[in-house]
Image (cartoon, rainbow, N blue to C red):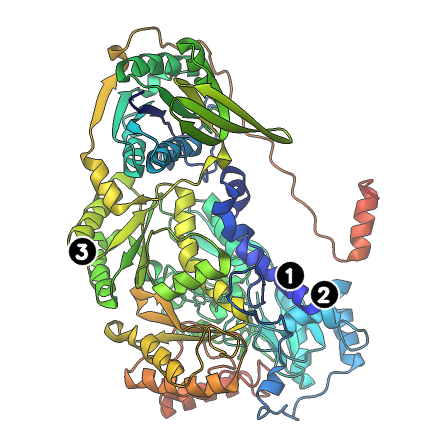
Amino acid sequence: MASVSRFSLPLRRLRCSSATSQKTSRLRPAAQVRWTTASTEPHQADKSGGTKGASAPAKVVKFTSETYPELKRDSKYSQITPEHVRFFQELLGSGSAVIDGLSTDATDDIEPFNSDWMRKYRGHSKVVLKPGSTEEVSKILKYCNNNMLAVVPQGGNTGLVGGSVPVFDEIVINLQRMTNIRSFDEVSGILVADAGVVLEIADNFLAEKNHIFPLDLGAKGSCQIGGNVATNAGGLRLLRYGSLHGNVLGIEAVLPDGTIVDDLIKLRKNNTGYDIKQLFIGGEGTIGIITAISILCPQRSSALNVAYFGLESYEKCQQAFREAKSQLSEILSAFELMDGRSQKLLNRATGRKLPLEGEHPFYCLIETSGSNSDHDSEKLTNFLEHVMESEIVSDGVLAQDQTQIRDLWSCREGIPECLGHWGGVYKYDLSIPISSMYEIVNDVRDRMTEAGLIGDDDAHPVVDVVGYGHMGDSNVHLNIPVRRYDKKVEKALEPFVYEWVQGKYGSISAEHGLGIQKKPYIGYSRSDTMIKLMKQIKDLYDPNGIMNPYKYL
Amino acid sequence: MSGLRILVPIKRVIDYAVKPRVNRAQTAVETANVKHSMNPFDELSIEEAVRLRERKVPVEEIVAFSAGPPKAQDVLRTAMAMGADRGIHVVVEESEQLEPLGVAKLLQQVVGQEKSNLVILGKQSIDDDANQTGQVLAGLLNWPQATQASKVTIEGDSVTVTREVDGGVETLRAKLPLIITTDLRLNEPRYASLPNIMKAKKKPLAKKTLKDYEGDFSARLKTLKVTEPPPRKGGVKVDDVDGMIGKLKELGAL
Ligand SMILES: Cc1cc2nc3c(=O)[nH]c(=O)nc-3n(C[C@H](O)[C@H](O)[C@H](O)COP(=O)(O)OP(=O)(O)OC[C@H]3O[C@@H](n4cnc5c(N)ncnc54)[C@H](O)[C@@H]3O)c2cc1C
């Protein structure tokens, strides 16, 4: 199945994301680098993967239009013609910049742009464009706008709400050819770069200069910084460096009518008028295409420590978090939660050995980063002694070298990928007040059990219900790994999850955005007034509605 | 025989995930403000010693030893957290860098004092890549040596060591006392657990200096110059298949 093998390409990149993994495998016994060399393909069955019973067949992703027959193509958009394609080919010149599925059979080439990372959404697009400059983006959009051609801006296509792939025949505009790092100021730490730069490449570039990209996430080997800004990604270090709404200083973007928004400012302070760039941060490609960003990057910490704990209850996780904040204060850079089930599935899907002997209901990972390793070690040691002696944590390990640091992080970062192992995942990314953050996972699990949907064999669609996430930000990822996408499961989940979150005054989408998945549910987290104001903005910048239709609002 | 008295020499080196940089004067690798940790081969040595004990081989004592700067005590604590019973730290200042022969001379005396009958060393340290200390020590002690071990079994005073050689494996047997050097596939080192890190703090760590040992430890080699490998030439991106074929032809690959 060509589509499957093609699709695995970006995923492999994702897994081998660490630049030094080659070195790791050279120096480590093979068993320890299983994570980077595992042959199991996420979202795809693997008979040897340790799943008990039959494994799910590796099937083609279902079309979004079949899964959701109530979605209808809006007839106001033109059908794409060979003439349109010819225009794009002339504009973009180079053969590889246009994938033409209209006059040629390019199904295999287009497939990776049509289906999303979760293998849950799949569009019918016939044309993919890869502009190489802001001017080209501008000319493309202007032409599409004049000809009523709908488009989908696409970065690394790692988005988790179906926002980055077409629903019907929208043209995909992928930024992978825009990869210039335009400038970096070593004094101020301000980086200016094209939207298509892959996050990990940007971060490696900054590492050479002793700086760090203020965002890090599991998809760093594939996602693009423009996509990160378009989704206002939160990630693993938000606790320390804050949100992109604060760190992004300037944006260059193109509006549907071709206007280039030239706001690529390199200033921390600039109180001259409305801050329009904020609309693009988290705008998910609905009002324009981001072509470049300027972003404030902090100094990279020279002293890094990572510890991984086992804890007996969620109550204890909260205590550990409080202690970490009070004792580690300014050096605490991440506090992540993983429930025992998520770690067990990681072990089952990848075969990797977990760091702790024995099983614990909860695990936490903490990272400290600072500039003075003696100072940090002393603080950390005091903290660790305290949480051990007061029995807040039941067991734990402290990474002794860089490789162990990476291995411990992969226990957290590897979760999203491994959960797709059985066929698919239902993902909810929720902001919930910290005291009741984990209750939702238990409640959903109970619900699945009562409905008889969860079990060990193929008769049950649901493999398990797990929770993990950025505890430091009160952000839990409720994930339901399944053997197949199933309407019964979806009915049991929605609107239940959203109502539950609304009842706690939480957010139904903490960091992944709305896309197609959450569009119908925005009302659970925003008032009618707010939604009306948002619609006005959409209509103002994209009056023809060609930008990423059927999604967001 | 009463039991094994294992000596495990370990070294603090630049963390192997860190890319080393040559200093401006091109005399050495930059070490200030660079993450250091235990030489990865030495982790395998400690792990193997601890596993021997866990496998109920009669192990009387596991002593970790390091000659190095004051900070070398961090890796000794790690070794004790992994299961070594105590540590010996010979504090060596930056100015008095030891060569493998010097280290082996120190170890020869430590073996005598500690009545060790098994020394497990890493096959090399990843900073100097000398791959000599174990062999020189075997020479000085006139003990048998089994280098680059990928498997070790002990019954009574008979030790069987499997080592990986080009295209296969070689199995050796020797009687104690013995020198073993470790290779990558020997085992998978454990994490230092928090309770063991706490306990390690209370384990004895003896501090010594070179003056506590006899002999000449001065260096016999002088480093003239250290340079980085030439930078890799960046690749080029081709636009399409035709471009790729053209390029391959140009390079003579087709
Ligand atoms: C393993 C994994 C871990 C993840 N972890 C996190 C996490 O910790 N925190 C978090 O917040 N998210 C996380 N995500 C999801 C996250 O949103 C994306 O990974 C990333 O931010 C999207 O970047 P991308 O380049 O892949 O964008 P895409 O997926 O291609 O696009 C995402 C959205 O942005 C739009 N878009 C993309 N590029 C542009 C552009 N240049 N201009 C305008 N619109 C654009 C698209 O139309 C789409 O709506 C994770 C995803 C994966 C697969």
The answer to whether residue A422 is left or right of residue A275 is right
Q: Are marks 3 and 1 on the same chain?
A: yes
Question: Residue at position x 45%, y 71% from top?
Answer: A281
Where residue A140 appears, as percent x and y from the top left, is 67, 74
Q: Is residue A480 visible?
A: yes
The type of residue carrying mark 1 is: Arg
Q: Is residue A215 visible?
A: no
Q: Which mark is residue A527?
A: none
Q: Mark 2 or 3 closer to N-term?
A: 2
Q: Look at the picture and state if A537 lies above or below A50.
A: below
Q: Chain of mark 1?
A: A
Crowding at dot 3, Cα within 10 Å, few <14 / some 14-19 / many 20+, comes out as some
Q: Which residue is mark 3?
A: A391
- Cα distance between the residues tagged 2 and 1: 8 Å
Q: Look at the picture and state if B92 lies above or below A283.
A: above
- Cα distance between the residues tagged 3 and 1: 53 Å
Where residue A51 appears, as percent x and y from the top left, is 51, 65
The type of residue carrying mark 3 is: Glu
Q: Secondary structure at mark 3?
A: loop
The type of residue carrying mark 2 is: Ala
Where residue A118 appears, as percent x and y from the top left, is 54, 71
Q: Mark 2 or 1 closer to N-term?
A: 2
Q: Which mark is residue A177?
A: 1
Q: Mark 3 or 1 closer to N-term?
A: 1
Crowding at dot 2, Cα within 10 Å, few <14 / some 14-19 / many 20+, comes out as many
Tell me if label 2 and label 1 are in contact, CB under 8 Å: yes
Q: Nearer the viewer, mark 2 or mark 3?
A: 3
Q: Which mark is residue A97?
A: 2
Quarter-of-image position of residue A137: bottom right
Say which of B135 and A401 sits in front: B135
